[in-house]
Amino acid sequence: MTEVKTNIELDTDLRPHNFGAGPAALPPAVLKVAQQEMLDWHGSGMSVMEMSHRGKEFGQIAEESEADLRELLNIPANYKVLFLQGGATSQFAMVPFNLLRGKATADYVNTGFWSERAIAEAKKYCTVKIVASGESGKYRDIPEPSSWQHDSQAAYLHYTANETIHGVEFHHTPEVAGDQLLVSDMSSNILSAAVEVSKFALIYAGAQKNIGPSGLTIVIVREDLLGQVVPFAPSLFDYKTLAANGSMANTPPTYGWYIAGLVLKWLKEKGGVEAIAALNKQKAELLYRTIDQSDFYVNPVAISCRSRMNIPFTLKDPTLEKPFLQEATAAGLLGLAGHRAVGGMRASLYNAVTLDAVQALTNFMSDFAAAHKK
């Protein structure tokens, strides 16, 4: 069993702080272990990148990583955990393929860019009903649940738990209508706080925010829902096929899976999801307080649904945005440019981003504002 020692001596003070939205920062302790094991994993004579996915060595990695994820999220025994390729965007099709179960309609909540992408893909395979949308308010709020227009005959309700681009996050679990299944894209906030998995039919998440490197996607699906795929689905889009083969119906993203396993062990050593949630709350509050107490920076998102993971902000004088980003980069504060769809700035505070990093950012923001006030 690999131990991810959090007290490994690293030149972390020399590393810049990475606020990128994804691929995102990884814990330095994890990177150090990966560096040490690069040429020879546990005396096997092989790098993990060279191993057969069907060999006993990788089998140990796969088994431990699934067990650790189940422990961290308290995943019930009647759920399958899949380690897949294709990114979360592949799940935009795989969800309707597997969960429509002969029904013609699915409910979707539209809270931003990634919700829009999921909706556009699902429309190719079923009738999509938008039960609620924040589009008219430029995705700065989540519509009040009492206003949602559910279709009780819809196969499932899909929502994006956290919108990385618009900075909107659900701080509650939505209710479904009738016997609908609840589905969530948790790509950018999985493992950042506790979640009651048993309320969901399916949870999916791209790894490159809080789990590991890009190229790996996690799917947590209730076992009784397997085997009801639409007839035109490719074999590798059938959750039953993937589950029956232990996520190895074809060669999985083995190195990403291995790094994810190291991250999961690191998170356990940090005290688990509850401990990291408290730290994430502290980090987000520090940055929001810096923005809100300033007459220089603006965050447009309603306070009730502000994201803890992705915090977009602008400067009241937009001509200073380019100098801000240039000076931030020079100060070792990386990845702060906002998404091209919305512009401005964005700080992503995923699990591996330290409180010290956020303190460095807020100090820089205060100094920059003081230097550029007119």
Image (spheres, helix red, strand yellow):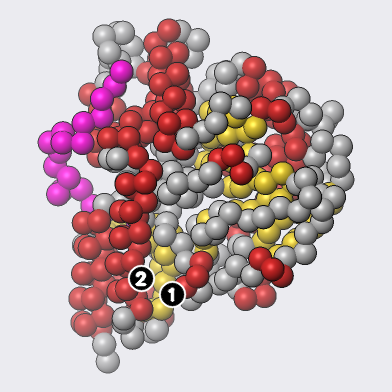
Q: Quadrant of the N terminus?
A: top left
Q: Secondary structure at mark 2?
A: helix
Residue beneath label 1, please?
Answer: 299
Between disc 2 and disc 1, whose residue precedes? 2
Residue at the spot 34% in from the left edge and 16% down from the top edge: 47
Majority SS type along the magenta span: loop
Residue beneath label 2, please?
Answer: 288
Compare residues 131 and 358 and report the one nearer the observer. Answer: 131
Left or right of 166 on screen, residue 25: left
| Amino acid type, mark 1 | Asn
Residue at the spot 55% in from the left edge and 72% down from the top edge: 140
Residue at the spot 73% in from the left edge and 23% down from the top edge: 235
Q: Is residue 62 above or below residue 153?
A: above
- Write the start and end of the magenta stretch as one range: 1-19
Res 334 quadrant in image: bottom left
Asked whether the residues under the numbered discs 2 and 1 touch, taking CB atoms below 8 Å apart as contact, a structural biologist would say yes
